[in-house]
Amino acid sequence: MLDKTYRPAEVEARIYAAWEASGAFAPSAERGGAPYCIVLPPPNVTGSLHMGHALDHTIQDTLIRFHRMRGRETLWQPGTDHAGIATQMVVERQLAASGSNLGRREMGRAAFVAKVWEWKAQSGGTIVRQMRRLGDSPDWSRERFTMDEGLSRAVLRAFVSLYKAGLIYKDKRLVNWDTQLQTAVSDLEVQQIEVDGHLWHLKYPIEGSDGEFITVATTRPETMLGDTGIAVHPDDERYRHLHGRFAILPLVGRRIPIVADEYSDPEKGTGAVKITPAHDFNDFEVGRRHGLAAISVLDELGRINANAPEAYRGLDRFVARKRIVADLEALGLVERIEKYRHVVPHGDRSGTPLEPFLTDQWYCDAKTLAKEAIAAVEDGRTRFIPRQWENTYFEWMRNIQPWCISRQLWWGHQIPAWYGPDGQVFVEESETEARAAARAHYGHDVPLERDEDVLDTWFSSGLWPFSTLGWPDETPELKRFYPTTVLVTGFDIIFFWVARMMMLGLYFMGEVPFRDVYIHGLVRDERGAKMSKTKGNVVDPLQIIDDYGADALRLALLASTSQGRDVKFGPARVESYRNFVTKLWNASRFLQMNEARLDPAFDPAHCREPLNRWIVGEVAKAGLAVTGAIEGYRFNDAALGLYHFVWDTYCDWYIELAKPLLGGEDAEARAETRATAAWVLAQTLHLLHPMAPFVTEELWDKLFGQPGGMLIVADWPHLGAELVDAEAEAELGWLVRTIGSIRAARTELNVPPSARLTLYQHGASAETLARLERHREAILRLARLETIVMEDRPVPPQSLVVVVDEASFALPVGHVIDVTAEKRRLEKEIGKVRAEHDKGIQKLENPDFVARAPVEVVEQLRERLEELRATLDRLLQALKRID
RNA sequence: GCGGGCGUAGCUCAGGGGUAGAGCGCGGCGCUUACACCGCCGGUGUCGGAGGUUCGAAUCCUUCCGCCCGCACCA
């Protein structure tokens, strides 16, 4: 017997263990289905599960379970990411917090990296344990880590071959430099933040003039130490006479040319721009055009370096800023200072202002790789769902910049480049090969030094869809599952990750990494705010699972996921799905109490009872809808559809209507109803399983004893539209309307539920009479009636009257009736019907409508109008009787 | 500046040329062969504004207003 209440925690642990033990998560070619593969976006290995993961994983697990049940050979490839900067920062922070005065640098590289591995060993299991609590069903036996042996080999192979193809190169150019982390970061890791600052107008003396100045405006006065020119617009009359002249850089004394360049915007600032090629991306270009030197005046920590006058050396950039402004003011060279709100690039990890910084870094020629990646989406080899994300993808891909892939970190894949004594570089997959290459180059052995830098984390994750399947080896899995079927992820990493996988996948595999990219929204709090630790509005999915169960969380997330929208997540929705799970549980208990069992001989296509024929059709419709919804990535439709089927259709109507049959005299009807109820519930458990795996598996086991094995590997129901019986549908539709109308009328007239009424009919057709007869017990029960009088009788006095189709039903309520209330009710009803009726008439009187609207629309309206007219007549009669 | 999204019931949102929907909340009533994490009944909308296309617009187009998100922008 099922327990009176459902206890998710206990059931979930047991069921999950059973799944894992059964090997159900591994791909199985047994049923011969086509491969279906999803690679899990690898979470940070030392992270923990947040709501974003919960949504992302629930969607993937639902897809995987759905296709597994449909007989596809499914692989959900799990794994974790080493998350270079993030993880290194965590460990550094721990070192700092531990009070040890051994920082990363003091410790040395080897010891520090060992420390990170230690941390990974200690906390690396957290997120995969949490995934189990959510019910994720990936093939754990294939779990990978971006820094494990195999994936590291893939990284080496990828780097070396791109290098040898000229698509990776080393270059000295400006990068976004994080002075706190002391590493370069890519354009994508830059956050533009609006800040209140100042615009300093500085006067530079014109060489050889009589006290003439040229005024430039800047938000970063400290960079003036590196100025090597001033640009004015060629057409700007104010400065025309200065073209080709020189200014003397204050505080430094450098002679810097005034050049004409279109970059200068006469509208902005003073129209004259100081040019600091080593510290500004635009200036770098201007400098290059005019042959201006790039003088770097900062060091890695953001302090003024030895290229600057001695007075400023060693000062932090912001201290230097103040000092320089003060010194210039003292010289009378500050024309004015304006308050100025502007955007300043910040590091997305460190949160500190970034400096454009001139260094040697490794770059990947993204422009070349992007060509095919753009084409693949243009021609539909890969499609985004929802579609509009393709614009975002194109926009970025078409303007893509060289990708800076080196990082001055220690945690990550060290770049496989070795330098000879003269700086000659040898890029090989191993030191041995590098030595060989060096020997070939120099003619003898030389000491080699390995590049210190590591690769951007996204370089290794960019290989994920094929590296996890075994590449560079030609494994059977790679052959079978690449290209993968769908990638499920958030829009925030389209550039970081999706784009890179597209480029690298196409380059190395010659084929897109995935056919579909399903982009879901962000999980926000119930008020729509982004969840963040600082705001304190973070919802912990594990807490939700503890409180409501994993199925409730999953259903709530799926039900709130409409394409192209963020998910606002509050406890209310989870609660309603927790209630839903309970409802399903209770309905199952009811079946159990009524000895409803699966009957192998049961044929859903040949039920005798209209009620059973009807529910078979209803579950078939629900099944078709769910199948279509999941196939179309419309998870809210899938979840909501089953919610309504289970709650409204199956529990509120079917079970209620079935009660008389289950307790009745007719043994055949009873047996059929038991079998039908069980069969329909079994179908429902199948349909619900991908979304709510735990409770469905438990009920499948406890109620039916897992015929044919566990639900996780059961066949998806084959429910065809041929199971829908139009006649039964019409009959039950009538029944529901009839009971509903009587209930509504009773409530509106304040007839106490305990009052058992007699029902008289007037004008009922033979069919209606037959239906009344067939469903007598159910109607008596659900409409709270004493008897039904089948003979056509005039409406007794003191009755409330309900009109259903051609028939009027009268319910004498004796002295209970409140005439004015009944009048009011009828009038309201009449008003509604008349409004619709009149609207229809108007339409039909419009010759254009009749002439131009499709015939079936006109015909439908005519039929509807006829019904309305009949109903209206009967209602008017009823009203007249009262008056 | 460029691109995208959103504006529908008190709240959160589905829908998307042919009778305005759901959940929650709210109000009333509780007799029931599982379920109070329940049952039954109920109300509410100028579908952001204005034009247009159409026999017909919440739905398509134009435009305006309001909100949000990317990207770009350190004079």
Image: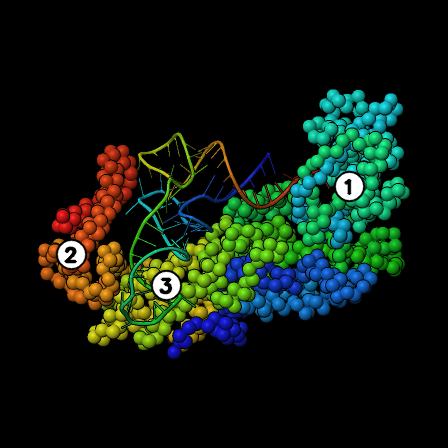
Callout 2, which amino acid? Ser
Q: Looking at the picture, which amino acid does disc 1 mark? A: His
Residue A33, given in percent of the width and then of the height, sits at 47, 64
Q: Is residue A167 visible?
A: no
Marks 2 and 3 belong to one chain = yes
Q: CA distance from mark 3 to mark 1?
A: 64 Å
Q: Is residue A227 left or right of residue A701?
A: right
Residue tagged 1: A279
Label 1 element class: loop
- Marked residue nearer the N-terminal end (2 or 3): 3
**Residue highlighted by disc 2:** A799
Give the mark nearest the N terminus, 3 or 1: 1
Which of these two is toward me, A334 or A730?
Answer: A334
As measured in the structure, the alpha-carbon distance from the residue carrying label 2 to the one carrying label 3 is: 36 Å
Q: Which mark is residue A646?
A: 3
Residue at the spot 24% in from the left edge and 62% down from the top edge:
A752
Name the residue rendered at 24%, 71% in the picture. A661
Mark 1: few/some/many CA within 10 Å (<14, 14-19, 20+): many
